[in-house]
Every structure is written in C-alpha cells, then in structure tokens.
Image (cartoon, helix red, strand yellow):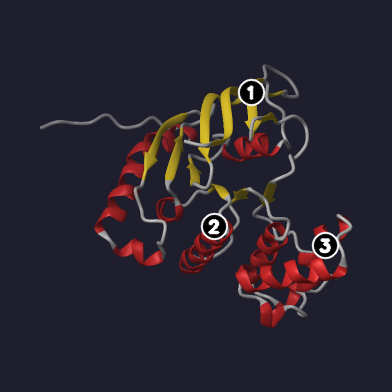
Amino acid sequence: MDVQVALRDVTRSFDTVDGPKLHALGPLSLDLRKGEFFSVVGPSGCGKSTLLEIIAGLSPVTAGEVSFEGGAVRGEVPEGIGVVFQEDASFPWLSVRDNIAFGLRRRGMTTGDVRQRVDRALSLVGLRDFANAYPAQLSGGMRQRVCMARTLVLEPRLILLDEPFGALDQQTRLLMGDEVLALWRATGATVLLITHSLDEAALLSDRVGVMSARPGRFLDIIETNWPRERDSRLASEVDFGKVTSRLWLLLRDESMKSMGKAAPSTVSA
C-alpha cells in the first residue's frame, strides 16, 4: 500500500473568548492511499472541514503529525495539493477560460502551455462551449466545474473537496458525482471529499471514514468494494443501499449527540 497522506494522533483545539479551549478534533490517525477516493462523513460540527484544512496545511495541529508524500505539512499548502471549497470562488470579471488560466499565469507559464492545459481542463469538465462565458451566465453546477477545472490545470496529486456540491439539488449532485469520478479516473489523483450526503459518500468512494460527534474521531472506515469504473447507476443497486444503511446506523446516535439529544434506548418486547 502506497501511503500518500499520513495523520498520526492528530488533535485540534481552538481558543474561546471566555472559558476552556474547544476540543474540535481527535485524536485521530489516518492513512490515505495513493490514487484512492476517500470520503469523510459525520454530524455537523464534528471537525470534517477542520480535518481537510489540516491536511491542506491551512490549519495547524494542536498535537500530532501530518505528512504528505513523506514531507511534514506545516503552515502552507504543499505543492501537489489542490483544494476546492463549497463557495463559488470564480472571479466574476473573468471569462471561464481566464478563470481556469489564473493560477497557471501566476506561475509564469508560457502562453502556449497555458492554452494547452486550459483546453484539456475545459474538455475534462465539459465546458468547451462556454470558454468565453462569464460566471454570471452559468448555473451553480457549471460554476463549480470552473472551480474544479482551475484546480485540475495545476495537476495536483491530491485533490481536497470540501462540500463542493452542497448547494445543488440531489439529482444534480449525483450527476456531478459522475463527472468527479470521470475526472478522478482521468487524472489518477487521490481525492478526499468532505460531505454531509451519505448517498454521495457511498457512491463516490473506495472508502468512507465515519466521524463521531465533536471532538471528531473515526468511528469506522468502511470499504465499499466498488469497481473503479462506476457511475450514479450504482445508486439503484441493492449493495448501494446496504452501504448507506450502514453509514446511517453509525451516524444516527452521533448526530443526535451533536443536536444535544440523547439516543433512545432499545425497548425489547
């Protein structure tokens, strides 16, 4: 097993205005395998996004160690990691093509190389016919594809997705999931997805990490055993329902804890 990201006994706490520190995450450990699709689910406030920010180098650990491809992650996004957040981060004054080219131009790449990479990214995300459009002329899903493409052109080896389709309806999310799977297969990158959607996690993932209520820890890591060549048609299969049911059984009590409710006791006849 080729480990690309390793977390060892990681914890994260935050200062509060008055009172004790808020223990948000951990301790937890995790190995991300090179080329896999790994999703993280858990109740609101359990530290899912904090975990992603720690891996990206955007948030420091309070204790423990994080490494990417053998090098310690400390204080900045390592070369080779791309991040896509839920918020639409496209620049409204730039065309789709110029949005996607933005990071490449900042790197000082030649015009020819930029054009070649952008053209490939436009094809990968299905936006060739909208290369000269502006974000205001696109749907929410299409704007998220622009953000995906802007990350893909930088050719990251690890792609971190923080609820990128959270604002979309369920049907569109499933179809966007098909596109993400196609991109994952085409690029060979490792993908870590943070999501609230159990269906999305079950469909897209090789493995799903299920987190507890705060402080977030991994309750279990579930192997889906799906074929690499998969798409949203998988959601109609019996085994898909078994995976989502298993995720919900793990999460139900934790979600009630996060809402301040006690889980009901089991009553036997």
Left or right: where 68 falls relative to 268: right
Rendered location of residue 137, percent (x, y): 72, 78
Q: Quadrant of residue 215?
A: top right
CA neighbours of label 3 inside 10 A, class few (<14), some (14 to 19), many (20+)? some
* Observer-nearest of 85 and 179: 179
According to the picture, the residue beneath numbered tag 2 turns out to be 184
Few, some or many residues within 10 Å of mark 2 (<14, 14–19, 20+)? some
**Element assignment for label 1:** strand
Residue 58 image point, x, y percent: 73, 37
Mark 1–mark 3 distance (CA, rounded to whole Å): 32 Å
> Closer to the N terminus: mark 1 or mark 3?
1
Residue 247, image quadrant: top left
Tell which tag, 2 or 3, sits nearer the viewer.
2
Of the two numbered discs 1 and 2 on the same chain, state the one appearing first in sequence: 1
| Coordinates of residue 118 in the picture (x, y in percent) | 74, 69
- Residue with the mark numbered 1: 65
Q: Quadrant of residue 52?
A: top right
Q: Quadrant of the C terminus?
A: top left
Q: Which residue is mark 3?
A: 102
